[in-house]
Image (cartoon, grey):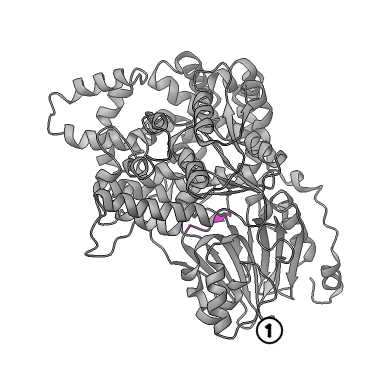
């Protein structure tokens, strides 16, 4: 819906020009307007993407007495219900916006107001009476919120670049963040790739006042109350169906045009099928096509669009365009990437903008919610095979040969239990399914990272809840990939073009239902996401339901390391570029680059090496992009509402 930013200083007045710079570097998130609130110690800024109450939903928002001031990014889906209850309690409203419920809820419930919100949100609330700043983020982390805290001063913004634009937060790579990128694939909240920048974790509230900063967790994922029975059989299918239909329905906007992404996979097809067939909505869809590539899935998106009766726009994408768009994509993502997957989505969301779409629905998050990746099947299989120690190596080799995984993957998978036992304290004694991949990257890049991070270990993850082994493994998704990669791509690559992505699979009620599903409602043998297939077998085409899971990938070595990306690789993986970056040893980078060129697509080591090369290259590109000079040209002219503030003698 927008971008937010702000700063508070409990010792001195804030400089309004810093606030302006923080806001305007986020202009892509809110092309429909800007708004500000200030007093002597606080400044709040808002960039508007008008979706709810288009005519009157400006921010910042205040209560009747102008004591509680709010800027927020996102949508509150139950705001009509909340408004009715608040009106009965005597609260008065000036607009029809969803955000106006927030200051009034805070008046009634204090910090517990966040428990009542059904939505995707990042909120900043200033309580002028108490001199307190409250930051809050939704349960799944759909909407981003970063902050920098130094003594009596705290800055926050929807994107890291908002903090850097203030001139009050140094720009430097964080060694711990770099270590996590090369282990988990992304930084882990509250850490980030950048020193002195924190990521407010999903399901958390931050309170800042003269006494300091305090973090409070208000939601724990996959938590299950004692005695709650797991959902199974037809009853589970029916509950899931009803909850998902409602999740899609509430995300269809009333006032602006909307659309959806349609890959032809199960998740996005289910979203479009529910909206079109069950809710009777009609809207455009778009998909990515990779002409001439074996990874192209265009035939499935075409099939799905024909069966569902939607007009689908195919966006062709290739290696030369990928190399041109990579720098801009990284500018918006603000963290290195293992894969080239994000780049074509930049073009898809731009296509949505050209179609006049302001809101786009996606199937993102379904795999992380329901165990949709092959790692979960492999993990379940491994638990069974450990009783057959003699036959286990043979079964693994045959399995990996059948699935056409590159040579060497079976040997690595066989050794995973031993490796996991060595580092089990990092996961609270649990077993993340993604350890199959994390450990592969770790073993290959350990020498590379020694010069950059020394002996820093990856960030430990919270221990899993008392639940089934599958739910315990899924628990780790909520602390790694889901908020820090999957939902980051959804948010940044859409808001880069002033389009808001909505993610039905991250619905509050659906998260609760998934936590109660019996494991066999998710995994059945080698078939994943059973409950989703069963719930919508009447509207999702059979050919889509029966497809083997195939994550969306784009080529790495043919696109970025050779061919059209040869110059890019030479600049950022060559000896001069590596020395200029100052993070890695040129010899180690050269060895990884050679391994990628020699073995990508043929050997497990070559495949992991190309992911490592992508991470190195994007690390160097980010370090080059995010320099103080990158923010010099930001327009910091004051709007009328801040001109008086600039003349105030309180301003330092």
Taking the view exactly as shown, the residue that stands out farthest to the bottom is 90
User: x%, y% of residue 539?
Assistant: 43, 40
Does residue 457 appear in this view? no
Q: Residue at x 55, y 56 (%)?
A: 198
Q: Nearer the viewer, residue 218 or 254?
A: 254
Quarter of the picture containing the N terminus is bottom right
User: x%, y% of residue 132?
Assistant: 60, 76
Q: In the visual, does 472 lie left or right of 189? A: left
Quarter of the picture containing the C terminus is bottom right
Q: Residues within 10 Å of mark 1 (few under 14, many from 20)?
A: few
In reply to whether residue 197 is colored magenta, the answer given is yes
The residue range painted magenta reads 196-202
Q: In the visual, does 127 lie left or right of 217? A: right
Q: Main secondary structure of the magenta part?
A: loop
How many numbered circles are shown? 1
User: x%, y% of residue 262?
Assistant: 54, 36
User: Residue 253 falls in which quadrant of the image?
Assistant: bottom right
Above or below, 215 relative to 178: below
In reply to whether residue 212 is colored magenta, the answer given is no
Above or below, 18 relative to 505: below
Does residue 519 appear in this view? yes
Q: Residue at x 67, y 65 (%)?
A: 7
Q: Residue at x 59, y 16 (%)?
A: 562
Residue indicated by mark 1: 65
Q: Nearer the viewer, residue 230 or 102?
A: 230
User: x%, y% of residue 495?
Assistant: 65, 47
**What kind of element bears circle 1?**
loop
Above or below, 633 relative to 295: below
Q: In the visual, does 54 lie left or right of 479? A: right
């Amino acid at each position: 819906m927008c971008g937010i930013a702000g700063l508070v200083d409990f010792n001195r007045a804030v400089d309004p020009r810093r606030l302006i710079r923080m806001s305007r570097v986020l202009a892509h998130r809110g092309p429909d307007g800007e708004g500000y609130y200030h007093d002597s110690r606080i400044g709040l800024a808002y960039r508007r993407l008008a979706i709810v109450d288009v005519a009157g939903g400006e921010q910042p928002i205040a209560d009747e007495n102008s004591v509680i001031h709010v800027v927020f990014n996102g949508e509150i889906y139950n705001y009509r219900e909340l408004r009715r209850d608040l009106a009965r309690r005597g609260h008065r409203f000036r607009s029809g916006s969803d955000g106006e419920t927030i200051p009034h809820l805070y008046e009634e419930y204090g910090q517990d107001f966040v428990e009542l919100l059904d939505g995707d949100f990042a909120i900043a609330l200033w309580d002028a009476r108490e001199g307190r700043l409250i930051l809050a983020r939704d349960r799944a982390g759909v909407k981003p919120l970063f902050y920098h805290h130094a003594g009596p001063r705290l800055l926050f913004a929807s994107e890291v670049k908002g903090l850097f634009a203030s001139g009050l937060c140094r720009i430097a790579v964080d060694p711990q963040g770099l270590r996590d990128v090369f282990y988990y694939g992304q930084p882990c909240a509250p850490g980030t790739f950048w020193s002195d920048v924190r990521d407010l974790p999903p399901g958390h509230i931050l309170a800042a006042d003269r006494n300091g900063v305090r973090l409070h967790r208000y939601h724990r994922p996959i938590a299950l109350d004692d005695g709650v029975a797991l959902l199974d059989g037809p009853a589970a299918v029916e509950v899931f169906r009803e909850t998902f239909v409602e999740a899609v329905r509430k995300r269809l906007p009333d006032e602006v045009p909307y659309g959806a992404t349609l890959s032809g996979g199960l998740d996005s097809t289910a979203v479009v099928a529910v909206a079109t067939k069950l809710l009777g909505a009609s809207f455009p869809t778009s998909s990515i096509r990779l002409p001439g590539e074996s990874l192209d899935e265009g035939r499935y998106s075409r099939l799905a669009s024909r069966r569902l009766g939607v007009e689908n726009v195919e966006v062709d994408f290739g290696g030369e365009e990928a190399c041109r768009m990579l720098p801009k994509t990284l500018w918006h993502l603000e963290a290195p990437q293992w894969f080239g997957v994000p780049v074509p989505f930049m073009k898809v969301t731009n296509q949505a903008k050209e179609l006049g779409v302001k809101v786009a629905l996606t199937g993102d998050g379904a795999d992380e919610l329901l165990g949709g990746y092959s790692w979960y099947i492999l993990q379940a299989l491994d638990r069974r095979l450990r009783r057959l120690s003699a036959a286990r190596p043979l079964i693994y080799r045959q399995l990996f040969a059948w699935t056409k995984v590159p040579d060497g993957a079976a040997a690595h998978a066989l050794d995973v239990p031993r490796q996991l036992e060595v580092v089990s304290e990092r996961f609270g004694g649990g077993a993340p399914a993604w350890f199959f991949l994390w450990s592969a990257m770790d073993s290959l890049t350990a020498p590379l990272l020694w010069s950059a991070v020394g002996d820093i270990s990856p960030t430990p993850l919270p221990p899993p809840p008392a639940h089934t082994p599958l739910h315990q493994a899924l628990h780790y998704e909520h602390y790694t990939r889901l908020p820090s990669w999957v939902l980051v791509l959804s948010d940044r690559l859409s808001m880069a073009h002033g389009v808001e992505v909505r993610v039905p699979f991250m619905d509050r009620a659906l998260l609760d239902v998934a936590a109660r599903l019996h494991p066999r409602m998710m995994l059945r043998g080698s078939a994943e996401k059973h409950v989703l297939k069963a719930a919508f077998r009447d509207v999702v085409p059979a050919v889509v339901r029966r497809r083997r899971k195939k994550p969306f990938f784009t080529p790495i070595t043919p696109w970025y390391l050779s061919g059209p990306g040869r110059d890019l690789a030479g600049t950022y993986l060559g000896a001069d570029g590596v020395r200029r970056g100052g993070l890695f040893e040129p010899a180690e980078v050269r060895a990884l680059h050679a391994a990628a060129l020699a073995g990508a697509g043929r050997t497990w080591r070559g495949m992991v090496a190309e992911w490592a090369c992508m991470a190195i290259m994007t690390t160097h590109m980010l370090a080059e992009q995010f320099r103080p000079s990158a923010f010099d040209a930001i327009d910091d002219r004051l709007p009328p509402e801040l001109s008086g503030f600039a003349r105030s003698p309180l301003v330092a």
